[in-house]
Image (spheres, rainbow, N blue to C red):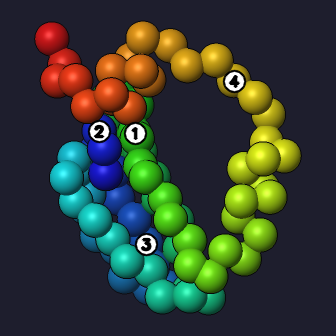
């Protein structure tokens, strides 16, 4: 978790997440991450095996990064 607050489900188990937390999901497990905080939720996702995740990202809808996005991605603390 790069920024924000959330909760995640892996199969039948739920866990609360916040900045600095990590979650490992076994390949093939059903999972979901929900934003439960007042602001945006930023996560870093790595999938191994890829399971066509890279193709999904490349074919997604392009979007512009705003100042908050850039601050989080650059690792700058909130003012």
The answer to whether the residue labelled 3 contacts the one labelled 2, judged by CB atoms less than 8 Å apart, is no
Q: Residues within 10 Å of mark 4 (few under 14, many from 20)?
A: few
The answer to whether the residue labelled 2 contacts the one labelled 1, judged by CB atoms less than 8 Å apart, is yes
Relative to 60, is 63 on the left or the right? left
Look at the picture and state if 69 lies above or below 25.
above
Relative to 27, is 74 on the left or the right? left
Q: Residues within 10 Å of mark 2 (few under 14, many from 20)?
A: many
Counting from the top left corner in percent of width and height, residue 70 is at 41, 21
Q: Residues within 10 Å of mark 1 (few under 14, many from 20)?
A: some
Distance in Å between CA atoms under marks 1 and 3: 15 Å
- Disc 1 vs disc 3: which is toward the camera? 1
Q: Which residue is mark 4?
A: 63
What SS does tag 2 mark? loop
Q: Earlier in the sequence, mark 1 or mark 3?
A: 3
Counting from the top left corner in percent of width and height, residue 57 is at 72, 50
Q: Which residue is mark 1?
A: 41
Q: Which residue is mark 3?
A: 9
Q: Residue at x 19, y 19 (%)?
A: 78
Q: Earlier in the sequence, mark 4 or mark 3?
A: 3
Distance in Å between CA atoms under marks 1 and 4: 16 Å
Q: Earlier in the sequence, mark 2 or mark 1?
A: 2
Q: Which residue is mark 2?
A: 3
Between 76 and 18, the residue placed more toward the observer is 76
Look at the picture and state if 52 lies above or below 58.
below
Q: Residue at x 70, y 64 (%)?
A: 53
What SS does tag 3 mark? strand
Look at the picture and state if 77 lies above or below 30.
above
What SS does tag 4 mark? loop
Q: Earlier in the sequence, mark 3 or mark 2?
A: 2
Counting from the top left corner in percent of width and height, residue 43 is at 41, 49
Give the quarter of the image for residue 30.
bottom right
């Amino acid at each position: 978790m790069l920024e924000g607050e959330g909760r995640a489900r892996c199969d039948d188990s739920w866990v609360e997440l916040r900045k600095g937390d990590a979650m490992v999901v076994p390949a093939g497990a059903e999972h979901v991450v929900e934003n439960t905080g007042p602001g945006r939720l930023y996560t870093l996702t790595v999938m191994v095996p890829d399971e066509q995740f890279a193709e999904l990202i490349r074919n997604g809808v392009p979007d512009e990064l705003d100042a908050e996005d850039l601050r989080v991605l650059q690792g700058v603390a909130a003012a």
